[in-house]
Amino acid sequence: MSQGIRVARHTDKTCCTARAGEPAGYGWLLVVLLGLNLRPFMTSVGPLLDELRTALSLGFRPAALLTTLPFVLMGVMAFAGSALSRRLGEHRVMTGALGLLLLGCLSRGWVQDNAGLFAGTVVASVGVATLQALMPGVIKRGFGGQAVLMMGVYSAALVGGGALGALVSPWFAAWGGWRTGLAVWSGPALLALLLWCRQGKRPTEVSGSQVAAVPMRFFFSNIRAWLLALYFGLTNSGYSSLVAWLPTFYREHGMGRQAAGNLLALMALCQAGAALVFPALSRQQADRRQMLWLVMGLQAAGFAGLAVAPSATPWLWIALAGLGLGGFFSLSIIVTLEHFSEVQPAGVLAAFVQGVGFLLSSCSPWLLGWLRDETGGFTAGWSVHVGLIVLMGMLTRVFSAGSYLHSMHGWQARVRAG
């Protein structure tokens, strides 16, 4: 190709590595704290949404934007994050992102109208989206051979932060009002910023071997890349819908604010467990479709329960949905990465899939809010998710292990030809 793109195979020696016993300043505490800050900004809104809507005269569809905006930006920053880091420097971009998250959370403590609320949401969302886009690279460079372990710790912290947002914000809201319940997350953001500024810029040992980047535009004309993005985005869209509307849904069924928030926390905890367990169960399987069908079945059962008998066993429906969502998220990323043997193009493909996928997922809170306004309830919205899972279950058939190399064979030849 005229662009002269080269792709090199990764080995342990081509990664940035830290000195033995020192993770290049990216300490375990720092990684956990950064992960914990990426979800409370979103999950804290749901349990307090009724009070927020009443105080600001906010309709269901506009309220959905409070969850939709972060997912839109997650998609955009999956495309732009690495380029921004190369241009301005990783440490500077991470510092700025943490500053934006802090500012956005603080602004919620003084918000007086819808314009202020959404402005703060955009500011914090840009920070969260940028951090999420860059964290895998930070961990890879900071921990070397321990990077896989730390990615698991980071993922658990990320989902755990979502649980904390749903649990803790109602406590502070009961004490100081809904503004306090939302603004309290500026505290962890400030702590993460201070720790990052202190530890985040220590030197690392970098090998001389560099791997040239494969432009993401290569995947815009690849059918399998778009199928993977569709698969990832639509099946994971249930998460953004539940984060946005689950507490409101159960408060409409007579549940208290704290109890409704606890359901969201339960979902996050089930996600965290499933994200670790299901990949481990499938590690001996070259073809992951059976495990994918299992987790999609769990997710479908949870949404069906919400649609048909929400008050019967709410904890069961939420646990099933959480297990299905957590298991699918990790397995779908693994399937995406397995389409390439080379690490660098596999990472670019995963970024493409997540970028398009998060943009698709961002539509579901708005859709459920619109259906709630039109129908007077959430039954239609939960049923839509059951239908999407069924359709994506049918699409799962094409993702056999034997199809990975075939679907990318010509693509790999084009990339290697350079």
Image (cartoon, rainbow, N blue to C red):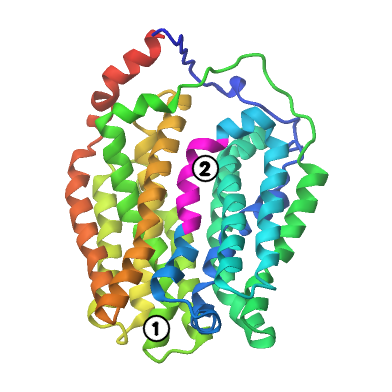
Task: Give me the residue at 25% from left, 27% from top.
Answer: 407
Which three-letter amino acid code belongs to the residue tagged 2? Answer: Met
Q: Earlier in the sequence, mark 2 or mark 1?
A: 2
Task: Give me the residue at 23% from left, 30% from top.
Answer: 403
Residue 368 sits in quarter: bottom left
- SS state under label 1: helix
Give the magenta-colored segment's residue range.
Answer: 69-81
Specify the label residue 250 is tagged with: 1
- Secondary structure that dominates the magenta span: helix
Residue in the foreground of this view, choosing between 100 and 172:
100
Residue closest to the far right: 198
Check contact, mark 2 vs mark 1: CB within 8 A. no
Residue 289 sits in quarter: top left
Residue in the foreground of this view, choosing between 180 and 60:
60
Specify the label residue 77 is tagged with: 2
Residue in the foreground of this view, choosing between 128 and 143:
128
